[in-house]
Amino acid sequence: MKVMLVDDSKTMRNIQRGILTQLGYTQIEEAVDGQDALDKVDAFSPELILLDWNMPNMDGITFVKQYRGAGKTTPIIMVTTEAEKSRVVEAIKAGVNNYVVKPFTPNVLGERITETLSRLKAA
Amino acid sequence: MNSSYIMPFVDSVNNVFETMLQMPVNVGDPAIKPHETPAADVSGIIGMTGDVDGTVVLGFPTTTAERAVAVFTGMEIHADHEDFADAIGELVNMISGGAKAKFQGKKADISCPSVVVGAGHSVFGRKDVKCIRIPCDCDLGEFYVDVAIRDAVESAVAEAA
């Protein structure tokens, strides 16, 4: 499965890449902000996107709005420090499929990925 | 400063260190930062705007910061490497993000973090905002979180006066 990691922090991309690799996801593309993700997404064609919220140039929520606005349906999991209920609701309304609050354990990220993909498979 | 803004930082620093570094933190009594304080070597700085505004600083001696980054990233990274600053920035980002989610009835945005690395530097915030220092200690060494924030309404009144 092809996974795109979008986070301006290299540290967080490395941590998430390590978790994904342990889970068996090895086809991984990285982007440093929403604009970088938009630039790379068509060529990479991810089957799952893990997306930070607060990033320079283009933040995660703007990426979601533009991506969904273009009719793209690839599942997106927001992985962010934004933990307020209002933010979660805003993200879900914009088209995010699931939500992980930083800090997170590898188990939590793994569970949310499995949950998201199972839910879509069942739909 | 509204003291209810401090406990969220105490909880958040514990949560971040326990979750991402598997490292329990002993948090000392928060107190107003004295004028004469030992200078830091590494500072992760984040700005807050919205209903609450101000600055949060995560400060370390170099050795403690390098140990924390090594545990956090799984790699030994020297303090002069850009990846070191990235890791410190992510720590202060998670601490601030976790704390602001617990501000009752207040919405705040956080900036992308800045990181200062340099032996014995001082970080000065706005003179008109009291800074509360939260002293922290863990197996990696001592560090602190400085919180200098206040209600935006309070800021506006002070500026208009």
Image (cartoon, rainbow, N blue to C red):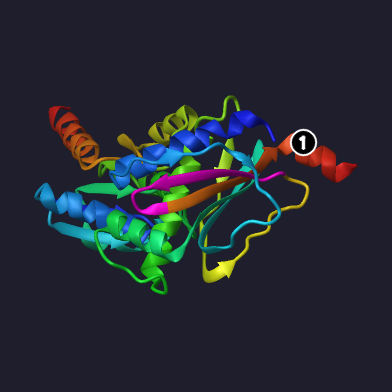
Based on the picture, tell me whether residue B137 belongs to the magenta stretch: yes
Q: Residues within 10 Å of mark 1 (few under 14, many from 20)?
A: some
Nearest the camera: B113 or B128?
B128
How far across and how far down the image is residue A50, in percent? 29, 47
Q: Residue under mark 1: which chain is it in?
A: B
A51 sits left or right of A118 in the view: right
Task: Judge from the rendering whether residue B97 lies leftward or rightward of residue B81; answer left or right.
Answer: right
Residue at x-position 28% and y-position 44%: B22
Give the extent of the magenta segment.
B130-141
Can residue A83 be seen by looking at this rendering? yes
Pick the residue in front: A76 or A111. A111
Q: Would you say residue A53 is visible in this rendering?
A: no
Element class at badge 1: helix
Q: In the current view of this chain or complex, which residue is farthest to the top?
A: B105
Residue B11 on image: x %, y %? 45, 33
Residue displayed at 25% across by 44% down: A74
**The image quarter in which residue A41 lies:** bottom left
Q: Residue at x 28, y 67 (%)?
A: B76
- Please check the rendered image and state whether residue A87 is part of the magenta-colored stretch, yes or no: no
Magenta portion: prevailing SS class: strand
Left/right placement of residue A34 relative to residue A44 reads right
The residue that label 1 is drawn on is B154
Quadrant location of the C terminus of chain B in the rendered image: top right
- From this view, report whether residue B140 is shown above or below residue A99: below
**Amino acid, disc 1:** Glu
Where is residue B10? Give x, y as percent.
49, 36
Name the quadrant of the N terminus of chain B: top right
